[in-house]
Image: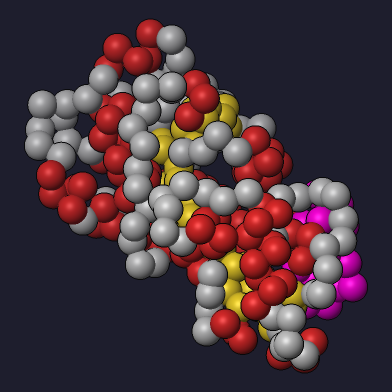
Amino acid sequence: MTLSCQKIGDWYCAGVTTLLIATRNLHKVGEIQAILGGAFQMLTLDDFPGAPKVVEDAETFAGNAAKKAVALATWLNSNPSLSDRHPRPAFVLADDSGLEVDALGGAPGVHSARFAALDKHENSPDADNNGKLLHLLKTVPEEKRTARFRCVVALVRMADLPGENASPVCYAENPETIASVFDGACEGKIIGEPRGRNGFGYDPLFVPAGFDKTFAELGDETKNQLSHRAKALAKLHDHFNKLVI
């Protein structure tokens, strides 16, 4: 994607757009960078250690993603001095994704990251989540282990936020009114034991439709073409092509 030098709100794009991603997960950042390309400078929560922690308590992926993106963008907007250390982002991006298993009624869904300990708001270790999933599916035959990874990406343009002295209440209560959301899904099935050492989360258990290898066995190039995040980010890519001309 080629971006021209034009003003976006209060910041200029000189061939590279600064994007703050609401994560500390380097695997996720690598996927996003690979898909969106070199036209973006990526910042993460590691670059802003004082960023607020957002409780992901929405009932949908879109709700969680928008809540995180708006909360982080609002915090940045109310702390202009943060740009003294890093380039001021033109956009804030957050995502929420998870695994939906048909035999479990769509679970773990929005609880995917903390599936092994649903009573907590902290993520569970991948091994614990995978172990619980395999335990619940141990009597389910292979043909009924259909599942999909789903991802929703929420994007907030900093220029669309109210001034730093304005009340953020309406945006905090209704984040999806200001965030642009993009979704993607990848159909597949859950196998009986983990395979592969790449990827993260449920990747070692998920075989995408049309393949005989798990996400953890497929190379990044292939995975980034067919993953749920890739499909959502492809829609985001198209959005940027229309937004920044």
Left or right placement of residue 218 versus residue 71 in this view: right
Identify the image quadrant of the N terminus.
top right
Give the vertical position of 102 relative to 197 (above or below).
below
**Residue 211, magenta (yes or no):** yes
**Residue 38, magenta (yes or no):** no
Q: Nearer the viewer, residue 148 or 112?
A: 112
Residue 128 shows in this picture: yes
Residue 45: image x %, image y %?
48, 29
The residue depicted at 45 percent of the width and 43 percent of the height is 93
Q: Nearer the viewer, residue 131 or 237?
A: 131
Mark count: 0
The residue depicted at 51 percent of the width and 69 percent of the height is 109
The residue depicted at 81 percent of the width and 56 percent of the height is 216
Give the vertical position of 138 relative to 230 (above or below).
below
Question: Where is residue 90, by image quadrant?
Answer: top left
Which segment did they paint magenta? 206-223
Question: Where is residue 132, by image quadrant?
Answer: bottom right
Residue 135: image x %, image y %?
69, 74
